[in-house]
Image: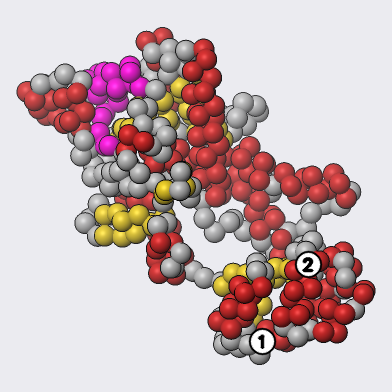
Amino acid sequence: MDKDALPLAGLKVVEFTHMVMGPAVGVILGDLGAEVIKVEPVGGDQTRRLLGSGAGYFPMFNRNKRSICLDLKAPDGLAVARRLVEDADILIENFRPGTLAKLGLSYETLSGANPRLIYCSAKGFLSGPYEKRAALDEVTQMMGGLAYMTGPPGRPLRAGASVIDITGGMFGVIGILAAVERRHRTGRGGEVLCSLYETTAFLVGQHMAQQAVTGKAAAPMPVRISAWAIYDVFDTMRPGEQLFVGVVSDQQWAAFCTAFGLTELGDNADYAKNNQRVLARDLILPQVRALFAGMRREDLVAKLETIGLPFAPITRPEDLFDDPHLNAGGLLDLTLTDGTPTRLPGLPVEIDGERLDLQRDIPQIGADGDALLADLGLTPERVAEMRAAGSIG
């Protein structure tokens, strides 16, 4: 899609973020066409240097951004930051509560010079007794009930990706876009606050509602009573090749039994309705497990796809690099900051039948600093002085 045709083309975003939640807000806006300027400390965002499970944070959430390095504790660096925000549409930050305010970069201060500014803070908690606490994705998964629901009883387990950071960032984008729409009517910006804890609560709200409806607390997912009799992971003929299969309607049940020759099950009136099958799942599932255990996974997949049933091979993240569907347009060609080429998932939307292309590769540390400073009217000599003083990187 042409850059000028992107939905958020023309919006300027200044991003003071690190780790995942704040950068997730920025990468979504950038993918949608906004100009995103990432303000990093001199020497670069520490997220760039994380190891282990954090090694993928920076490359995944910082494409389509320009990088400038500023020392916000130095007067010249702070002055540049303020000038960047003077004509910005959106500011994103995810530092501890009060951090930017102490530097004179609060919403109250900046909106005085730029009343159209939309100021998004990504925090651990919304307003309330916990609002000053530090938080992490894993912290709020634990205290918000998600880890309890994910692991088996007595063994709380965080989800296998930064789901709260990312989803919380998505809610931040929703709030920002709502504020942009309101600004069309009022001419004024506003403050948007998104959070990890309340995001977690929203995600487990279905389990809270389950208790409200049934009077019984939801059991952790590994021991839950499923809403469907066949909705599970099955072993197939080859060791290690598993398959998830779901049969979630009476019509699918009939098609399933016919396709796999399960005549006795399909003809049994006691299993005709979904809730009957749920109550009889201890009788039904052993027969299905035995059937699948004698079949190759690829044969099962072919048959399930033909009859239109939900299924999924159990795969690992590294398997997605070779996934034919993702390679048809869902992966973006990127270059890691050490020069290594890779492919990573793009924004999971299509607009007018098109996926969103890469506009800017993952930025090197401060790669756009000189150009951005020139845009602000600073001469090369003045930039050299500021760099020598350590105000900019």
Q: Nearer the viewer, mark 1 or mark 2?
A: 2
**Residue at figure coordinates x 62%, y 31% from the top left:** 130
Work out whether mark 1 precedes mark 2 in sequence or the reverse, and give the earlier one. Answer: 2
Above or below, 58 relative to 52: above
Residue, x 39% and y 63% (percent of image)? Answer: 327
Apparent side of residue 301 relative to residue 48 in the rendered image (left or right): right
Relative to residue 16, is residue 170 depicted above or below? Answer: below
Q: Which residue is mark 2?
A: 251
Q: Secondary structure at mark 1?
A: helix
The quarter of the rendered structure image containing the N terminus is: top left
What residue appears at the point 71 percent right and 61 percent down from the top-left corner? 221
Residue located beneath label 1 in the image:
293
Q: Badge 1: how crowded within 10 Å, few (<14), some, or many (20+)?
A: some
Residue 101 in picture, x, y percent from top left = 43, 20
Q: Nearer the viewer, residue 14 or 102?
A: 14
Viewer-proximal residue, 60 or 345? 345
Estimate how packed mark 2 is, as few (under 14), some (14 to 19) or many (20 or more) residues with alpha carbons within 10 Å.
Answer: few
From this viewpoint, is residue 164 visible? Answer: yes
Q: Residue furthest right?
A: 270
Q: Mark 1 belongs to which amino acid?
A: Ala
Query: Magenta segment range?
Result: 66-88
Left-right relation of 17 to 122: left
